[in-house]
Image: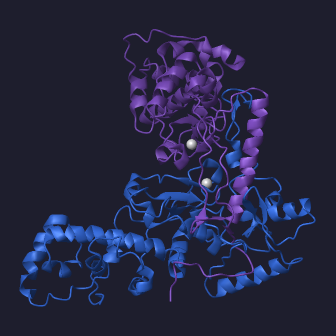
Amino acid sequence: MTALTNMEDYVSESDSDYTSYWRDWFISSRGNEYFCEIDEDYLTDRFNLTGLNTEVQYYQYALDLVTDVFDLDCEDDMRETIEKSARHLYGLVHARYIVTTRGLSKMLEKYKKADFGKCPRVACHSHPLLPMGLSDVPSVKPVKLYCAKCEDAYNPKSSRHAAIDGAYFGSSFHNIIFQVYPALVPAKSVERYVPRVYGFKVHAAASLVRWQSGRREEMRRRLRRLEVDTGFRDGDGEEGDEDGDVEFEGVDGRPAVVEGAPVR
Amino acid sequence: MSTSSAAPESWISSFCSLIGHEYFAEVSEEFIEDDFNLTGLQTQVAMYKEALEMILDVEPEEDDEDEEEEDEEDESLIGEGGEVAGRERRHHSRMASDLSVIESSAEMLYGLIHQRFICSRAGMQQMSEKYELGHFGACPRTNCMQARTLPVGLSDIPGEETVKLFCPACLDVYVPPNSRFQTVDGAFFGRTFGALFLLTFPDYDLTKRGADVMQDITSRISGHPEILNGFFAKNIAPGLGAGHVYEPKIYGFRVSERARSGPRMQWLRERPGNINELDEARLFAEQNPESEDDEGANTNGRVAVVRRRAPGNARLRQRQQQLQQQRQNGSPMALSTNGAESEL
Ligand SMILES: [Zn+2]
Ligand SMILES: [Zn+2]
C-alpha cells in the first residue's frame, strides 16, 4: 500500500456548517450519482491539485466556482465554458480524493447502498458494483462498473452514466478499496452457466468449461501451497462433472432431427 | 377460424406488442394448430380449451344467439381492463372474472407454446432475424464489446425464474437491463433455445454488434474457418481469452494473486491461447495411442467424449458444402450426439 501514502494521510474532520452550493448541486444532479462530495478542505489544499492547472481550462475560475467563491460577471458563453471546466476539475480531483482515507469511506458508504448499481451477471446475485476507469488519462475511456465477485468490468446501463469520463474514478480506486478493507472482499463462487440443449451440454462449451475448471484448480493448488486464502468457500468447486457424458455437437457431418419441436 | 377481415389485431400480435414482450416471437397459427406441438400442455394450463381459443382468436362455438348484447358488453370490458380491440368479439359470452382467468391462462399457454416454437425451424428463423438486428440487446460485459445476446430461461418450468440474456461471446447469462423484463417468465424461452440457436446458426459472427449489422456489415463468418468440437473455432467464446480478461492494477502495477484481494476469478474469462487445447478427443488419442479412437473411454465413471473424425480435410469440406446449402435453402438443424448412449 505504499502507493497510497502520499494522499491517504489527509484526513479532514471539519466540513463544518459551510454550505457548498456548487458541489451540492453537482452531486445531486441527475447522472452524477457515482460521485461523492469532495471536502472543502481537500479542495482548498493546493497540494492536492498539483498539475491540474495545465489540464483544466480557466483553472482558477473553475476552482473558484467549485469552491463557491466565483462571482465574476461574464457572458453566458463564458459562464458555460467555466462551468464545463469546473465539472472537469471536480472529476479529476475526485479521482484523487476517493483514494484518500476519507474519500474511500465515503465511497464505501455508497457501495453499501448499491448507489453504483448491481452486477448484471446472474451468478453474482446482484452483488453491488463500484465505478472504475480503464485509464487515468482524461477523455480516453468512459466509466465502467467493477464487480468484485466475478472480478469483471461492465458497462453502465444508463447512457447518462456511460458518458462519464472514467478518469474521474481512475484505474486503481476499485482495487485499493479492497486492500484497505479486506473484509469487504466477497467470497468467490464457482457457480456458472452451462449452455444445454434438451438437458445435454453443448460439447464445445463444455470442453471450455472443463479447461477453465482445470485452470481454477491449478490456481487453488498454487495458493494453498503458498498458504494464501483461495477466496472460495470450503468445498466449493470440488463438484463433479455429473452429467457430462453426452454432449451435443453442432457443425458436424451428420444432421439430426431435434426432438420435441417438430414442424410438419 | 382466425379473424382476418378488416384486420383487428390478433391476440398474438397484441400480446407480442405489449411493453416487456419485445423478446417474443409471433408463434404461427400453423404451429399452434398442430396438436402434436401442444402435447402435454393441456394439464399445465387451467381452462386450456378457452385459452387456446383466445390465442387463436376463435369464437366460442355456442354464442350465436346473444349477438344483440354485444355493444353494451364490449364497453364494460374495455372500461375494465383496457382490453385490446379484436378480442372483444368473443368476450360477450363470458363473465369478466372468467375472462381474466382465461386471459392469464392464455398468456401461460402462449408462453409454453413459445418455448417450443422458438426451437422449431420457423421459430428459430424468426428469432434469428431479431438477433441479427440486436433486438435482444447487447452483453453488459465490457470485454464483450457489445456482442448480441439471446433471451433464455434458466428453467423450463414456469414461475421459477424470469427471462435472462445469454451472451454467446462469453457464454454467461445476465439480467436484462430494463426492469420491464423482470416480470417475463424465463420458461417462455426455456433452457434449450440459447444453445440450440448457436448450433443452428454456426456461422453468425458472434462478435458483431447489432449496430454493425444495421450498417450493412455482414454478420456471417466467411472464408474457410477452422472447426473444433463441432463449432467454428473462432466462435467458441470469442469474448474470452487473452486481451479480454480484466487484470486488476493499482497505479499501473498488477495486483498479485498472493494478495488477499488478488485475482481469483480470471479462469472464468480465460480461453486457451491455442484453442486446439480444447480438442479433448485428439489429446486423448495422443496420450493413449493404443486405444480405439471411436469408443468412449470410461474414466471415473465418466465417459470421455471421443469423436470419430474423418481423415484430412474431408469433414471441413463437407461442412463448407453444407453451409452453402443452408444459405440457399434456409437452415436445417445440424445436430448430433457423439455416438455415446445417453445415460440420463
Ligand atoms: Zn459480478
Ligand atoms: Zn458477453
Q: In which quarter of the image is residue B36?
A: bottom left
Q: Say whether residue A247 is left or right of residue B32.
A: right
Q: In which quarter of the image is the N terminus of chain A?
A: top right
Q: Where is residue B253 in the image (x, y as percent from the top left)?
A: 75, 29
Q: Position of residue A75 (x, y in %)?
A: 43, 32
Instruction: Using the rendered image of the protein, determine whether residue A94 is visible from the camera's viewpoint.
Output: yes
The answer to whether residue A162 is above or below residue A221 is below
Instruction: Using the rendered image of the protein, determine whether residue B243 is visible from the camera's viewpoint.
Output: no
Query: Who is closer to the viewer here, A225 or B26?
Result: A225
Ligand 1 resides in the quarter of the picture at: top right
Q: Say whether residue B163 is left or right of residue B301.
A: left
Q: Say whether residue A150 is left or right of residue B136.
A: right
Q: Position of residue B54 (x, y in %)?
A: 27, 78
Please identify which colour was used for chain B in the image: blue
Q: Where is residue A153 in the image (x, y as percent from the top left)?
A: 61, 43
Q: Quadrant of residue A255?
A: bottom right
Query: Who is closer to the viewer here, B131 or A206?
Result: A206
Please identify which colour was used for chain A in the image: purple
